Amino acid sequence: MSLSRREALGRIGAATAALGGSALAARLTWDPGGFDVTRLEAERQVRDFGLKAGAGPVMAIAKSSTDAADLTRKAVQGLGGMSRFVARGDVVAIKPNIGWDRMPVHAANTNPVVVAELVKLCLDAGAARVVVTDASCNEPNRCFQRSGIWRATHAVGATVILPAAHRFRELRMKGDVLDLWPVYTPLVNADKVINVPVAKHHNLSKYTGAMKNWYGLLGGRRNRLHQNIDVSIADLATFMRPTLTVLDATRVLLRNGPQGGNIDDAKDLHQVIASLDQVAVDAYGATLIGEKPSNVKYLALGEERGLGKVSWEQVPRVEV
Amino acid sequence: MAEQPHPHPGAPELPQPIPWLGAAGRVEPLDRKAPAPKGGCGSGACGCASGAAASAETERSSPSGSGAAGGQGASAPPAPTKPPPPSKLAKWWKKRFRPRKLPGSGIPARKVIRFLAKARVVSQALFLGIFLWFLFQTAFRGTFSAEAGKAIRLPLPVEAFLLADPFVAAMTLLSTHTVYRGLAWAVVILALTLLFGRVFCGFICPFGTLHHFFGWIFPSRYLKGNKRVETNKTQGWQRGKFYLMWGFLGAAAAGSAIGGLFDPICVAVRAIGLGVVPALQYLGIRGATVAADSNVRAVQTASDGAQDFFSQTVWTANQAYFHQTWFIVFLLVAVLFMNRIIPRFWCRALCPLGAFLGVLSRFAIFGMEKDHAKCTDCNLCLVNCQGADSPQGGVKHRQDECFVCFNCEAACPEDVIKFKFLPNRKSEIVKPDLQRRTLLASTAAGAVAIPAMRIANWPDRAYSEKVIRPPGAVEEREFLERCIRCAECMKVCPNNALHPALFEAGIEGLWTPILVPRIGYCEFSCVLCGQVCPTGAIQKIDEKQKMGIGQKPISMGTAMYDQGRCLPWAMATPCIVCEEFCPTSPKAIWAEDVEVPKRESHYEAGGDHAKMTTIKVQRPHVDPSLCIGCGACEKVCPIVDKPAVYVTNAGETRSRTNVILLENTSYSS
């Protein structure tokens, strides 16, 4: 029995389609090998949320009270009030230090009263949404709850976001040592960013405050950063230029940093410093824990990169 | 259902005309007693059932009979007027949910039984739901409403199913001679069993419900019709679970709660909590990655929202990993797969809790009675039987195997099977059908297995340094008396630090919890593992005891440096992340400032050698009197594969012999 023409054509057609289909699929998915070298030639990335430079003080040191909320208001007022920084309808990201599973008394995290007061000021200035977040070192749920920041800021209307794997996106920063890292998106997807660090002792970098607080911007294995901690910190501070920095020195950690753990490791200082200059505020903060700014190497690196001035005494400032 | 005129018990056995049809029913076979009515009696179903009046109104539906005439339709009241034509929805509803026709005499089961068989499904779904919800909530999720100083505990009694587990209570009672705290709740299930038999298996057990579900959803084609009937007859191998249970009780008497390996609640928590949920989370995160790569803002937002929802309800914010959990999941899949061939294979053949309740069900007040004379061998009871407990006529029912699911009575069209209080036990076997010698042998085997396993592996002798027990764990001998491998501690650990041991703790220590700092470290102020431990293998310590506020802290081991791998020690590179993460105050890791030689990484210009310089580094050291063995240093060490600082169980507080320092030595034992 001979094959019908119709069936012969059908079979040949099916074989041709199968062959052609696999050839097409192979062509579309073919990997000729080799890296995509163009991706390595990126520019240094900067996320600048800063204001255009204007006249007036760059740093406002509030130390005329023992009430943290009062100090915060005075410090921000010293720089012209929150309405200078936050416009109506802005999404504001506030980045306190919520790194450790410690209570406010241990002074390892930012004072919740300072953070809550900033949230209030932002909302009063017309912010549409105020996000409070950090990428913690210890387990985030414990850090957010036991730092008191979750409760205090939620109560005044902030959106508190806890870090989770899906909130990090890989980004090429092209810093001197930091390049491809997972970046914490809630901090960069905002109109204005306020950095609210706490002044602390740190055994490797001697002092940590505003510039090192940007460690909380990164996911992944941050432990590698310690091998060149000063340049890492400078890279991060170069990448991230906040609208405003408010350094919490109401209670500072003098030893066993950055975690403390013992109530006697910390001391009440009752100061809050608002600043437009990340470097100057850290230089001043270092003096508060008894460290010379010249011993804190990343400050000089920051000045070299034009982020601010180490000699904080020369910065226009007010004391309120 | 309306009351039907009941004929007198002594009514003639020949069929009477059906009143509203004015016609006689099908002629009953004369060689058999006419069946008694059931269910038709709306008021006092029990009275009706015990009345057992022969009824002639009961219509038998032929296999080809119309739907309206069959089953319960027969006992429906006559419609006084013609009802309005049913709506489309009503028609669909009727077609979908119309009571199934019963073959044979078509006598519907008692109303209460039909209700109970349906209520059983609701109860099973409810308890499975509660079980899963508790399992998902076995994780700390913070709240905005808590004060900073509030002690962190779980709000729900997430280990409730284990506390109510009488087999766990019995094992730990035999091994420790005490009933630990919440395990007293086991009397609730005991009381239920003494009243009603193994209702736990039929109505409550979440693992049994899973098997029931899988037996229903995917029976193989070899599990239909007559093959299913044969499969559901009582099999000799069902004795296996009793021997297994006696073996585990023997092991418990010899000082090991190893029976937790087979306890159904432990299996469910372990396999679902450590395997199924993390696997679903993995799929979810893969989906989120694809959504993120799509670079479509709306897709990313939706995916982030879904991730937030699931990480707050089902899983947690970061991917959970469990050391060697594939073996646990493999066994779960295998035992669920068996339902394809033998329904509820696990419950019938392996479950030691079911066996334990089976032994106790001999005292049950509630039970089954059979009227063998009425049985037509239609085998409908067997088709629906869950426990393979011989519900059919001609053989004795097996109370020790019966899950009291009421399927047999609900299916029986001939009014053979009756569940009732204080039934006559003429056709009932209440005790497991075991051979005394095999029983004694299996108990003895369980008892001698423990010393056999321990001479191979015991603290002080050939013990693995990787066995770092959770904080608050009791001394190893007592730990093995208590640990039922339920994996609650591993599930709740916020840092994913606790893992099921494979053979690190010896073959007896299979799936007991060990700290694997490489994957996660023990959070300094966290005491949740002790909170959820149902048997006290991990004690309910508080933060002050753990952190050592005003007392000596609890230590799980000690950190050691591998100086050949440590960056400041071996490679002239600054690091000390370990020191940064060390949670104690003063820190157990301290750094020594040294100036070390360092060779430049490139040749000098024009030269043929690299220049030597010096660099200041801080070299870390451990103070063993302060180290608590939490493993934070090991977790954060940048040498990922084999960390330069690692924790072993040396110096653990719970041991009186595994001690490093002189001042910690106790010679009291």
Image (tube, coloured by chain):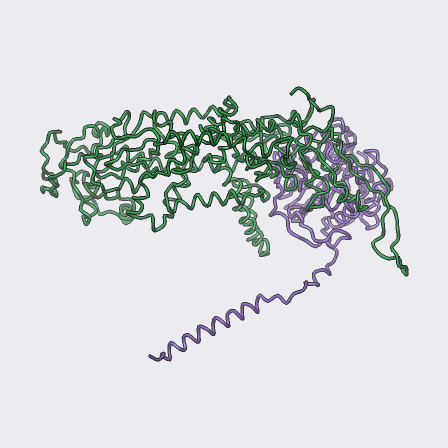
Chain colours: A purple, B green
Image coords of residue B324 (percent x, y): 57, 43
Q: Nearer the viewer, residue B272 or B443?
A: B443
Relative vertical location of residue B273 with respect to residue B544 in this rendering, above or below: below
The mark total stands at: 0
Q: Is residue B587 visible?
A: yes
Please, is residue B593 above or below residue B183 in the view?
A: below
Asked if residue B141 shows in the view, the reply is no
Q: Position of residue A80 (x, y in %)?
A: 75, 41
Position of A139 compared to A293: left or right? left
Q: Quadrant of the C terminus of chain B?
A: top right
Quadrant where the N terminus of chain B sits is top left
Which residue is at the far top? B668
Q: Position of residue B657 (x, y in %)?
A: 67, 27
Using the image as rendered, state which of residue A29 and residue B388 is in the foreground.
B388
Q: Nearer the viewer, residue B632 or A67?
A: B632
Q: Is residue B289 above or below residue B270?
A: below
Q: Is residue B280 left or right of residue A258?
A: left
The image position of residue B526, as x and y in percent, is: 62, 31
- The answer to whether residue A283 is left or right of residue A165 is right
- Residue B207 drawn above or below residue B425: below
Q: Is residue B534 left or right of residue B346?
A: right
Image quadrant assignment for residue B567:
top right
